[in-house]
Amino acid sequence: MSGHEITLLPGDGIGPEITQATLRVIEAAGVSLRLDEHKAGVSALEAHGEPLPQRVLDSIRTTGVCLKGPLTTPSGVGFRSINVALRQEFDLYANVRPVRTLMPGRYRDVDLVLVRENTEGLYVGVEHYIGVGGDRKAAAESVMIVTRHGSERIVRYAFDYARRQRRRKVTLVHKANILKLTQGLFLEVGREVARQYPEIAFEDRIIDATAMQLVLDPSRFDVLVTENMFGDILSDELAGLVGGLGFAPAANVGGEVAIFEAVHGSAPDIAGHGVANPTALMLSACLMLDHLDERDAARRLRDAVEGVWRDGTARTRDAGGSASTAQFRDAVCERLRS
């Protein structure tokens, strides 16, 4: 059979709706996929008794590529986060979050990319209580882990990305003025790597100043690279510059596996009503097509999605319109056919 084999996780809540819309526009862009579809999250818990079955991991390891809708991590069972579990299982060290202005808003022509270290920092989950006297929960402690290896590969990924995409500058974001060793190591390694890419401008900025400057003037940035927790926070801020998480695609990339996802929630309150905005997953599919070397299809699909928003052909409810998921999907398909 022809076509690219991928693992498909439609997800929970609105996930199946936006996934089907996304598959339809991929087909309209002329790309054939062979889908190994599985349940994960709440839907897997209900069907198989666990939120992340081994069959899901086996499939992703076999195909090397996964398109994933939003998942709900069940309370009180399984993992702290299914997304974190997937990143750790496959060493998906680079979280890539591009954001672009799609419709008129507070800012014009935002075009930024955040590259976030995905496996280290505070999110490794090394934490415990510290007992004092008879109170075993008198205090709690978390350990931030930053390695030279992890720092080097994420900064190098950011520079290689900038070189491939012909970006002008990389900004390394840190808190080395306070966290002298962990963030200091990240900054030290970042400066070493930057010297190997003389054609790309480099700067480093402190996290709090960066957060403020992004709001004041996002045009001063291009590619940002940072550690795990700071990247988690900044990625949502960047999405807010262009309308919210419904417009923000994401890729989680490792040496052997890449997972492409909508990072917004599963929105169970509107599930089944056919009104969800599929933009984030469609744009994540564009990242997947780039990864599969279907670059022309990725470009045409990205242009079609952006064109629908820019001319107001179909605006979903979260953006003040009335278009359904299906109407937005059809508008994108029509642009691809024209």
Image: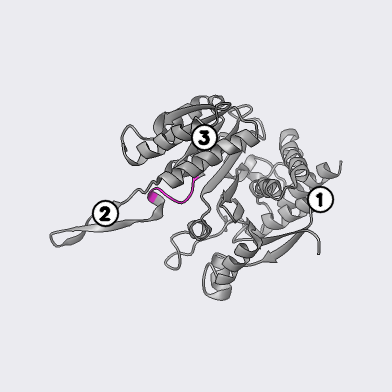
| Residue type at tag 2 | Ala
Secondary structure at numbered mark 3: strand
Which one is in front, 324 or 220? 220
Place of residue 63 in the rendered image (x, y in percent of width and height, measured from the top left): 66, 62
> Which of the numbered marks, if any, corresponds to residue 167?
none
Secondary structure at numbered mark 1: helix
Q: Is residue 3 visible?
A: yes
Place of residue 202 in the rendered image (x, y in percent of width and height, measured from the top left): 50, 27
- Locate residue 128: give its quadrant: bottom left
Identify the residue position indicated by label 3 in the image. Answer: 224
Q: Residue at x 52, y 75 (%)?
A: 49
- The magenta-colored residue range is 117-122
N-terminal label among 2 and 3: 2
Secondary structure at numbered mark 2: strand
Residues at discs 1 and 3 in contact (Cβ within 8 Å): no
Please tell me whether residue 106 is drawn above or below residue 44 in the rendered image: above
Q: CA distance from mark 1 to mark 3?
A: 33 Å
- Secondary structure mostly seen in magenta is loop
| Residue type at tag 3 | Leu
Q: CA distance from mark 2 to mark 3?
A: 31 Å
- Locate residue 151: give its quadrant: top left
Query: Residue furthest toward the right?
Result: 338
Identify the residue position indicated by label 2 in the image. Answer: 140
N-terminal label among 2 and 1: 1
Identify the residue position indicated by label 1 in the image. Answer: 28
Q: Residues within 10 Å of mark 1 (few under 14, many from 20)?
A: some
Q: Residue at x 72, y 47 (%)?
A: 293
User: Horizontal placement of 88 versus 58: left or right?
Assistant: left
Query: Residue furthest toward the bottom?
Result: 48
Which colour scheme appears in the figure?
A: one colour
User: Horizontal placement of 229 versus 245: left or right?
Assistant: left
Residues at discs 2 and 1 in contact (Cβ within 8 Å): no
